[in-house]
Amino acid sequence: MSATDFFPYFDSPKPRLFAHRGLAQHADLDENTIPAFQAALDHGATHLESDTQATADDVAVLFHDEDLLRVAGIDAKVRELSLSELKSTRLKNGGEIPTLAEALETLPGARFNLDIKTRPAISPTIEAIETLQAHDRVLVSSFSNPIRKSALTGLSKPIATSGSLSTVLSAWLSHTLLFGAGFSAIVKDVHAFQIPMRRGPVNFATKGFIARAQRHQTEVHFWTINDPEEMLRLLDLGADGIVSDRVDLFQTGN
C-alpha cells in the first residue's frame, strides 16, 4: 500500500504540482503570502510549499528567511519580533506576513507542504495544526532530521512527512552501492523525497532511484524546477511531483 492509501494529503491526481512559496514571480506578489498562495491555486497548483518560523511570542508564521532584509529591506530577525510587529511590517510589494493558522483558515481546501526552519518553530507549528485539525492536509518536513522527528512526535495524529537530506542520501547510497540493501528500513517513516536533481556529484534524477523509492511507497518530488521542458522530462523519468516557482508555466507546457 502506498502513502496515498493512508494520507488524504496524497489523494489528488498526479502529477503533484507544488507552488514554491506560492506564485510570486508571475506577478507583483510577495512570496509566502495569502495572495501568492491563492494565485498559485488559481494557476493549477495542487499543493502549496512554505516555511515556518516562530515569532518572539511563539506564533508560527509562514516565512523562509531568518530575517526581513531580503524581502522587506529591514535588518531584523523574525525570532526577535512579536506577531504584532511583524503584522505591521509590509514586504517589498506591500504584502503581509501570514500566520500558519491564518493561511490554513483562509485557504481551507489547500494542502500545505511545511518546512520547519528552526527548533523554536516546532511547538507553534504543531499548535496551529492541532488547533485547526489540519493533519490530513499538511506535510511536515525539515532539512534537520531531529526537528522533523520532534514535530511528528508532538502531533496527536499521524501526518505525512518527507525525508530530510540525511535520509535521502542514505537511501541513494543504498540504491547505488548496496543494490537496495537496507532501503526499506531507511524510508519506513517517510512518505516522500523532496529533492533537487543533483547534490554535488549525486544525481537523484534517475529512473532507477525514482522507481526504487516508489516500490517502497515513497513519492519523489523534485525542486525547484521552473523550466517547463525540465518538468516534463522529470515526469517522464517517473517523478510524482514538481516543486516550482512558476506553476503557471507547467500549465503552458502541457
Image (cartoon, rainbow, N blue to C red):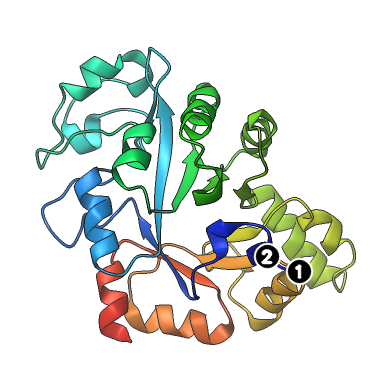
Is 160 left, or right, of 60 in this rendering?
A: right
* Quarter of the rendering containing residue 142: top right
Say if residue 75 shows up in the picture: no
Is 183 left, or right, of 110 in this rendering?
A: right
For the N terminus, the quadrant is bottom right
Q: Residue at x 39, y 68 (%)?
A: 225
Is 114 left, or right, of 87 in this rendering?
A: right
Image disc number at residue 254: none
Residue nearest the viewer, comparing 205 with 133: 133
Q: Residue at x 24, y 22 (%)?
A: 86
Up-down: is 147 above or below 221? Answer: above
Say if residue 51 shows up in the picture: yes
> Amino acid under label 2?
Asp
* Quarter of the rendering containing residue 84: top left
Q: CA gap, disc 1 to disc 2?
A: 6 Å
Image location (x, y in percent) of residue 8: 57, 58
* Quarter of the rendering containing residue 61: top left
Residue nearest the viewer, comparing 234 with 127: 127
- SS class, disc 2: helix
Image location (x, y in percent) of residue 132: 46, 34
> Amino acid under label 1?
Met
Residue nearest the viewer, comparing 9 with 141: 9
Q: Which residue is mark 1?
A: 1
Q: Residue at x 50, y 35 (%)?
A: 129
Image location (x, y in percent) of residue 176: 78, 71
* Count of number-bearing discs: 2
Q: Which residue is mark 2?
A: 5
Q: Disc 1, disc 2: CB below 8 Å?
A: yes
Q: Residues within 10 Å of mark 1 (few under 14, many from 20)?
A: few
